Amino acid sequence: MKSIRTVLTATTALCAAGSVYAADLEVTHWWTSGGEAAAVAEFAREFEAQTDNTWVDGAIAGGGGTARPVMVSRIIGGDPMGAFQFNHGRQAEELIEAGLLRDMTHVAEAEGWKDIVNPPSLLDACTVDGKIYCAPVNIHSWQWLWLSNAAFEKTNQAVPTNWDEFVAAAPALREAGITPMALGGQPWQSSGAFNVLMATLAGPDVLQQIYGDGDAEMAAGDKMTRVFQAASNMREMVQGSNVQDWNQATNLVITDQAGGQIMGDWAQGEFAVAGEVAGTDYTCLPGLGVIEVISTGGDAFYFPETGDAETEAAQDALAATLLKPNTQVAFNLKKGSLPVRSDVDLETANDCMKKGLEILGSGAIMPDVNMLNTEDTNNQLNDLFVQFFQDPSISADDAQARFVDIVASKD
């Protein structure tokens, strides 16, 4: 019988042609919307086409806030899946520290990830004590405002070109029976939208200083007061947006029931599934039309320890497949995200995706919040902003004071 080391070595060398052993590999993720499902199907297709293994889909509905605890519980409880999706950043720290995730450095070195992953911070986010524990698969950015062109045509208004124009257009939209801004009930949507306001109205350096350095004085300052005032405007604009999931909120924009939505570039997948054309049916404003900057967050796959040689061989094969050029193009065109390698052909990308590529190429990038905050800090922010956007009795000043307390106590 071959040793595990022999199996791993052979798999790394042959993963493009097929794994040494065929295995059914359960892959868990939270990609369940129309655009997301179309994108993850490309991963499954490429994995099965390039190896002898089978992708067993373990989708968990409800987004990351619902899926992550389920995944962690299974791994800690001794029932690990073959691979799982988390966001880039600090979400897997405790699992790594507990020795429950595999070191995938051998695959990264064999595939030359350090030479192809761009920006390097994506691979850095997978690295702990010099060991690489995950395969980054895309670049997602939060800093986008998606607008329904028809909603503004109906109210005889020009499509806004920035955040202030969007706020000014809100009363006419409301009078016409159109919800000015869509926002779903999932907690991460509220904190995510606020973080976009911070990054674009106060500046990415302010976000870095507050979340990265824990600067409570900056959190209490005038620049953040302006952000909380903008959040107060947003609270008025989202009234009547009675949906839960993010893609339901995106659908309000697609169906012209809402004027716009702050949401990450994954919203493009929903517009694509609906047959919407960028620049004709909808408009995208990176950086809310204020500061053209994008965060370089996104998704990565981790691989739990199982102690099974066949599963480990399939894990290696999947990790290698995820970053192959064809896989990167097929997946990201459907997902709306940017590829983690810059040497692939994206001529068929839509106008919004090309805007993202231009910004990435210009170097106007910032770290994703998940790379700066622990899950505990993010959950505290989620709680704060869900309450703020749902309860008009909470003043902007009170919300800012609570925000300062969270920043002051963050780890």
Image: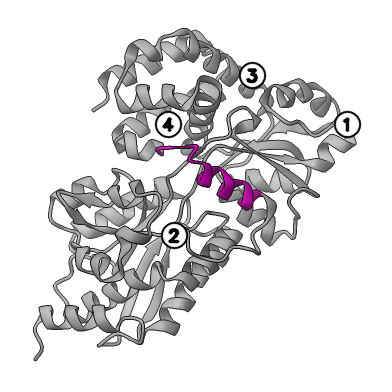
Q: Which element type, helix, strand or loop, lies under badge 4?
A: helix
The residue wearing badge 1 is 155
Asked which quadrant contains residue 348, the reply is bottom right
The residue wearing badge 2 is 341
The three-letter code of the residue at mark 2 reads Arg
State how far apart marks 3 and 2 are (Cα): 38 Å
**Image quarter hosting the C terminus:** top left
Q: Is 214 situated left or right of 382 in this image?
A: left
State how far apart marks 3 and 4 are (Cα): 19 Å
State how far apart marks 4 and 2 are (Cα): 32 Å
Q: Is residue 13 visible?
A: yes
363 drawn magenta: yes
Residue at 25% x, 54% y is: 73
In percent of width and height, residue 10 lies at 20, 84
The three-letter code of the residue at mark 4 reads Asn
Total tally of numbered discs in the picture: 4
Residue at 51% x, 43% y is: 141
Q: Nearer the viewer, residue 397 or 69?
A: 397
**Image quarter hosting the N terminus:** bottom left
The residue wearing badge 4 is 382
